[in-house]
């Protein structure tokens, strides 16, 4: 099996059944449940509220589009590890709910801060490209008209500059046919890349 996986270009990871079930409960099944629960809150949301939605909501709920029939089987087949990790999340949510009941109460804001700091710390451990260690990238935002060829021209310019695009995100402006393209590049070329793009007539700016 390892030889077959290698021949197909896969990466082989050896885990015991218990390690595998605990791992996928955390990195796959928990996000699916969380995304589905958050997305379900939108069912009765007003149109005016939904029109305010940005990438934060879209990113958080993307996997909520998964096939329910498939996921009922997945969750049922790995029920105990999923139940444990959801129980841990439940405890932390209970603490946050208590803090929000009276944000001015002693320790309430500390609870919220620890929750957010914990998220920062966990997010920083997510592997980078190709499974490499996490790496901080600079971000260059470019505003483009929403019409054919704009992205292609932008990427052609990046190639001409010799700057590799490590990652890319796009957010469309509500009510305007404009898109904000966020390019992730190596930190030491962030400012110079924004300067070069502006020199070529693009509306670009360096974020961090």
Image: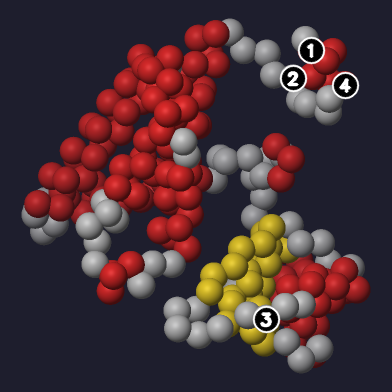
The picture quadrant where one finds residue 64 is top left
Closer mark to the observer between disc 3 and disc 1: 3
Q: What element carries label 1?
A: helix
Q: Residue at x 15, y 52 (%)?
A: 100
Q: How crowded is mark 4: few (under 14 residues within 10 Å), some or many (20 or more)?
A: few
Circle 2 sits in a helix, a strand or a loop, which is it? loop
> Which residue is identified by label 3?
147
- Whether pointer 4 and pointer 2 mark residues with C-beta atoms closer than 8 Å, the reply is no
**Callout 2–callout 1 Cβ contact below 8 Å:** yes
For residue 165, say whether it is visible.
Answer: yes
Pointer 3: residues within 10 angstroms few (<14), some, or many (20+)? few
Residue topped by disc 1: 2
Q: Is residue 148 left or right of residue 30?
A: right
- Image quadrant in which you'd find residue 5: top right
Q: To which residue does mark 2 refer? A: 12
The reply to whether callout 3 and callout 4 are in contact (CB within 8 Å) is no
Return the disc, 3 or 4, that comes first in the chain's sequence: 4
Residue 77 image offset from top left, x and y in percent: 43, 15
> Which element carries disc 4, helix, strand or loop?
helix
The N terminus lies in quadrant: top right
Residue farthest to the front, as pictured: 69
Mark on residue 7? 4
Determine which quarter of the picture holds residue 200.
bottom right
Mark 2 / mark 3, whichever is N-terminal: 2
Q: Where, quadrant-wise, is the C terminus in this rendering? A: bottom right
Task: Name which of mark 3 and mark 1 comes first in the sequence.
Answer: 1
């Amino acid at each position: 099996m390892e030889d077959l996986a290698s021949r197909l270009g896969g990466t082989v990871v050896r885990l015991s059944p218990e390690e595998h079930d605990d791992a996928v409960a955390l990195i796959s099944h928990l996000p699916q449940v969380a995304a589905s629960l958050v997305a379900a809150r939108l069912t009765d949301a007003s149109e005016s509220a939904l029109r305010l939605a940005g990438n934060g909501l879209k990113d958080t709920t993307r996997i909520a589009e998964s096939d329910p029939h498939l996921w009922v089987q997945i969750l049922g087949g790995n029920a105990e590890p999923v139940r444990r990790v959801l129980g841990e999340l439940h405890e932390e949510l209970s603490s946050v709910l208590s803090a929000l009941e009276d944000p001015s109460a002693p320790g309430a804001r500390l609870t919220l801060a620890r929750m957010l700091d914990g998220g920062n710390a966990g997010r920083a451990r997510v592997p980078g490209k190709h499974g490499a260690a996490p790496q901080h990238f600079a971000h260059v935002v470019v505003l483009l008209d929403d019409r054919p060829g704009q992205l292609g021209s932008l990427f052609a310019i990046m190639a001409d500059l010799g700057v590799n695009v490590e990652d890319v995100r796009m957010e469309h402006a509500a009510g305007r046919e404009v898109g904000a393209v966020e390019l992730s590049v190596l930190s030491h070329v962030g400012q110079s890349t924004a300067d070069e793009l502006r020199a070529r007539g693009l509306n670009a700016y360096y974020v961090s």
